[in-house]
Image: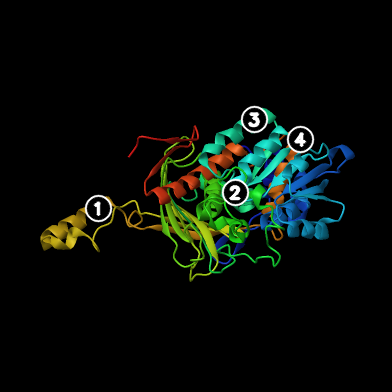
């Protein structure tokens, strides 16, 4: 995967900081303050370096993305597009009355003074707007999943390559220091040979299950419904399908397209992988029976093939929107000599190596043999294996925590705007973004069609004719 030169410089600086040891654990902690390091890509911004930004879709993630983008020096918000008038009014209140607001994103793309756009709409519009923006000569930051349907992916990649513009996909977690350091640890052999990854994003709230607060003026007058369903079969206005769009296949991609993509993105970065070749998923609508047509509990199994970068391994994914464990999530990389658990602002590695000796006695067939044979076998075993060879090896845990105040979202936009200004590679380009989202969209297909999906992660295409 390509990484920006600014990020490499940043990681090199961080890696040189002394490690601190605490109690019985080996704790990786950085002494340098985050604020001193986060500007590794920053410099004095001249008039020619200013980036003028337009945001298309100013809902929850549109706000979060815009706020993060504006923390990068030299970025100015010029215009906002959204299909709900209340969000346009809210944008003027928050970002200034001088910004342009419109319900037609093409008005933003037609402006010559806008250099880059954020696309944070419902999933069904991602590919269409991204292609239009690239053809209009804009750099593009597109929220994940990059596309609504697998069939759209190669068209977006083609438009990106022809445009020669910077495009980054918004799974910002891949820009975190925790992910980078986890990658380094696994590549260094800290957990031995990787065999399995187990990851989850669980929630226990109506908001977490996408039942967002509805505006009290929602109506066909304040929502441009006709534009929202453009290109689809005509259907009557439904506020749920607009404001709770993640719950409907026609507009969103469910838990797989939203949360599986985050998990797969991190896994692919850490393992330097292009993705799985076999996908299967199961689930059900267990609790949130609010009219949604996607599951609220879903599990997926993905098989990653052996490559030059990693051994073959299995991935198990889970999302549970009525989890008694409350809001929780993490990714475990399970190897032959340890387990790296990535969660929150860092990770923990538990080290454990098998003994050289295979073991004898206990839960074993030894006790089923005649006593004399047992004695002979034990004697031969102890002669072959020393006391040290017969012991498992455990080491203190290794713990990494990001510096206080670190912000992966700002870092992700730092890489994006570095690319816009300097042409440097971003962390998550469209090829990476498609390889991350396609297996998750295939998980949806597996669930709805009740079958295993085969995927070619190198050539980025579905494989047919396999059982």
Residue 161 vertical placement versus 363 (above, below): above
> Which structural element holds mark 1?
helix
Q: Name the residue under label 2.
A: 123
**Residue 452 coordinates in the image, percent (x, y):** 37, 45
Q: Which numbered disc, 4 or 2, marks the residue that appears first in the sequence?
A: 2
Residues under labels 1 and 4: Cα distance?
66 Å
Which is more toward the observer, 2 or 395? Answer: 2
* Left or right of 429, for residue 274: left
Whichever of callouts 3 and 4 sits on the residue coming sooner in the sequence is 3
Q: In this view, does 127 lie above or below 59?
A: above
Of the 4 image quadrants, the one containing the C terminus is top left
**Disc 1 designates what residue?**
383
For disc 2, the neighbor class at 10 Å (few under 14, some 14 to 19, many from 20) is: many
Q: Which residue is drawn at 62% across and 64% down?
A: 212
As helix, strand or loop, the secondary structure at mark 4 comes to helix
Comparing 282 with 172, the one in front is 282
Q: Mark 4 Cα within 10 Å, few/some/many (few <14, many 20+)?
A: few
**Looking at the image, is mark 3 or mark 4 nearer the viewer?**
3
Q: Name the residue under label 3.
A: 161
Check if mark 1's residue and mark 4's residue have beta carbons within 8 Å: no
Q: Disc 3 vs disc 1: which is toward the camera?
A: 3
Q: Residue at x 58, y 47 (%)?
A: 145
In the picture of the structure, the residue carrying the numbered disc 4 is 422
The mark found on residue 87 in the picture is none
Disc 3 is placed on an element classified as: helix
């Amino acid at each position: 995967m390509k990484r920006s030169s600014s990020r490499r410089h940043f990681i090199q600086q961080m890696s040189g900081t002394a490690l601190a040891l605490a109690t019985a654990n080996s704790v990786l902690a950085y002494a340098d303050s985050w604020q001193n390091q986060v500007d590794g890509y920053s410099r004095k911004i001249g008039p020619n370096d200013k980036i003028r930004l337009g945001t298309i879709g100013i809902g929850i993630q549109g706000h979060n993305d815009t706020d993060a983008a504006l923390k990068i020096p030299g970025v100015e918000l010029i215009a906002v597009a959204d299909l709900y008038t209340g969000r346009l009014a809210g944008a003027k209140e928050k970002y200034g009355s001088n910004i342009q607001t419109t319900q037609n994103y093409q008005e933003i793309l037609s402006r010559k003074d806008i250099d880059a756009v954020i696309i944070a709409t419902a999933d069904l519009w991602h590919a269409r707007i991204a292609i239009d923006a690239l053809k209009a000569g804009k750099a593009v930051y597109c929220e994940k999943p990059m596309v609504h349907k697998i069939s759209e992916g190669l068209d977006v990649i083609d438009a990106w390559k022809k445009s020669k513009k910077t495009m980054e996909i918004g799974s910002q977690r891949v820009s975190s220091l925790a992910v980078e350091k986890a990658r380094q640890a696994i590549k260094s052999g800290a957990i031995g040979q990787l065999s399995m990854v187990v990851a989850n994003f669980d929630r226990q709230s109506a908001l977490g299950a996408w039942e967002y607060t509805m505006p009290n003026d929602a109506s066909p007058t304040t929502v441009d419904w006709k534009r929202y369903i453009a290109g689809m079969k005509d259907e009557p206005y439904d506020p749920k399908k607009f404001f709770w769009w993640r719950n409907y296949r026609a507009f969103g991609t469910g838990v797989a397209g939203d949360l599986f993509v985050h998990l797969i993105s991190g896994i692919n970065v850490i393992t330097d992988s292009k993705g799985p070749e076999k996908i299967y998923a199961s689930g059900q609508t267990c609790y949130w029976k609010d009219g949604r047509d996607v599951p609220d509990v879903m599990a997926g199994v993905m098989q990653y093939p052996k490559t030059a970068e990693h051994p073959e391994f299995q991935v198990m994914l889970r999302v549970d929107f009525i989890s008694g464990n409350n809001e929780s999530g993490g990714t475990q990389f399970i190897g032959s000599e340890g387990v790296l658990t990535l969660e929150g602002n860092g990770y923990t590695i538990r080290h454990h190596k098998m003994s050289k000796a295979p073991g004898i006695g206990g839960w074993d067939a030894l006790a089923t043999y005649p006593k004399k044979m047992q004695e002979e076998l034990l004697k031969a075993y102890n002669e072959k294996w020393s006391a040290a060879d017969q012991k498992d090896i455990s080491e203190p845990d290794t713990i990494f925590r990001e510096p206080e105040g670190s912000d992966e979202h700002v870092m992700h936009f730092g890489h994006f705007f570095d690319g816009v200004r300097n042409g440097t590679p971003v962390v998550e380009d469209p090829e990476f973004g498609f390889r991350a989202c396609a297996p998750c969209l295939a998980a949806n297909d597996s669930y709805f069609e009740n079958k295993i999906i085969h995927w070619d992660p190198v050539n980025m295409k579905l494989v047919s004719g396999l059982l």
